[in-house]
Image (cartoon, grey):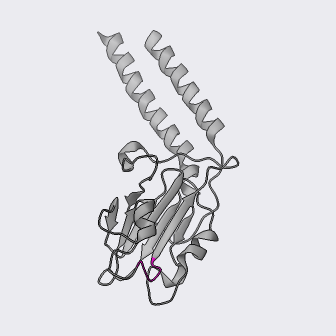
């Protein structure tokens, strides 16, 4: 009995160590994600005649990047919509609606994220943005766990809302796939060794 208890304690300790190692490996991926404030200093508004299409065209969006919408919630909102709804400025069936005035959305999938203001007339005035996340061969990252993201169809990816993050942009996400693979293989080998002994 004592030997089995020691083995079980060893597994719990190993699990804790592996969880810590995996968190440390994943830290550079999320710590290097860029943070983009939509509209830069003007924010999400109709007042400053911001061209959100031009704003988005000057950015290179990647997985794990954070999109921040800052606005007066008495006058605006943020709705994630389908491509057809975006083109038609139709806010009747949003995929997601944000209303805090300081909404942060983490990019979890490649593709287009279409956002507009659902207040009548605002989208028609240009308060809409297409965030296009390209597949990149030079940088990789890992999307948040399924528990942190919202399910969606491949045609219209849904971003996951998270608590507000820092407002400064960090460097692009760096490649860490090889290191993650090595850690996974090492963890599996250690677990197999412990279970076998």
Residue located 39% across and 69% down the image: 103
Q: Does residue 21 show up? A: yes
The rendered magenta stretch, by its main secondary structure, is classed as loop
- Quadrant of the image occupied by residue 6: top left
- Quadrant of the image occupied by residue 57: bottom right
The furthest residue to the right: 138
Spot occupied by residue 174 in the image (x, y as percentages of width and height): 65, 51
Q: Does residue 197 show up? A: no
Q: Nearer the viewer, residue 141 or 81?
A: 81
Residue located 58% across and 56% down the image: 62
Q: How many marks?
A: 0
Q: Nearer the viewer, residue 133 or 141?
A: 133
Image-based side of 69 in relation to 131, left or right:
left
Residue 179 vs 94, above or below: the answer is: above
The furthest residue to the bottom: 47
Q: Nearer the viewer, residue 141 or 28?
A: 141
Image-based side of 135 in relation to 35, left or right:
right
Q: Nearer the viewer, residue 27 or 55?
A: 55
The N terminus appears in which quarter of the rendering?
top left
Which residues lie in the magenta part?
123-127
Residue 99 vs 41, above or below: the answer is: above
Residue located 58% across and 47% down the image: 141
Residue located 36% across and 67% down the image: 79
**Residue 9 is covered by the magenta coloring:** no
Spot occupied by residue 38 in the image (x, y as percentages of width and height): 50, 74
Spot occupied by residue 91 in the image (x, y as percentages of width and height): 33, 69
Image-based side of 119 in relation to 65, left or right:
left
Residue 113 vs 88, above or below: the answer is: above
Spot occupied by residue 159 in the image (x, y as percentages of width and height): 42, 56
């Amino acid at each position: 009995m004592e030997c089995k208890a020691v083995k079980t304690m060893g597994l719990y300790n190993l699990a804790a160590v592996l969880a810590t190692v995996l968190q440390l490996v994943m830290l550079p991926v999320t710590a290097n994600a860029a943070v983009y404030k939509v509209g830069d200093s003007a924010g999400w508004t109709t007042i400053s005649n911001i061209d959100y299409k031009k704003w988005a065209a000057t950015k290179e969006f990647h997985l794990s990047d954070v999109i921040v919408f800052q606005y007066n919630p008495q006058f605006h909102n943020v709705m994630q919509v389908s491509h057809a709804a975006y083109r038609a400025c139709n806010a009747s069936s949003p995929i997601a609606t944000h209303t805090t005035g300081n909404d942060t959305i983490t990019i979890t999938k490649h593709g287009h994220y279409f956002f507009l203001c659902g207040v009548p007339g605002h989208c028609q005035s240009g308060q809409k943005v297409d965030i296009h996340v390209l597949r990149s061969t030079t940088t990789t990252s890992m999307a948040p766990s399924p528990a942190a993201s919202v399910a969606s169809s491949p045609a219209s990816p849904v971003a996951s809302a998270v608590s507000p993050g820092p407002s400064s942009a960090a460097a692009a996400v760096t490649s860490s796939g090889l290191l993650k693979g090595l850690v996974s293989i090492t963890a599996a080998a250690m677990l197999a060794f412990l279970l076998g002994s």
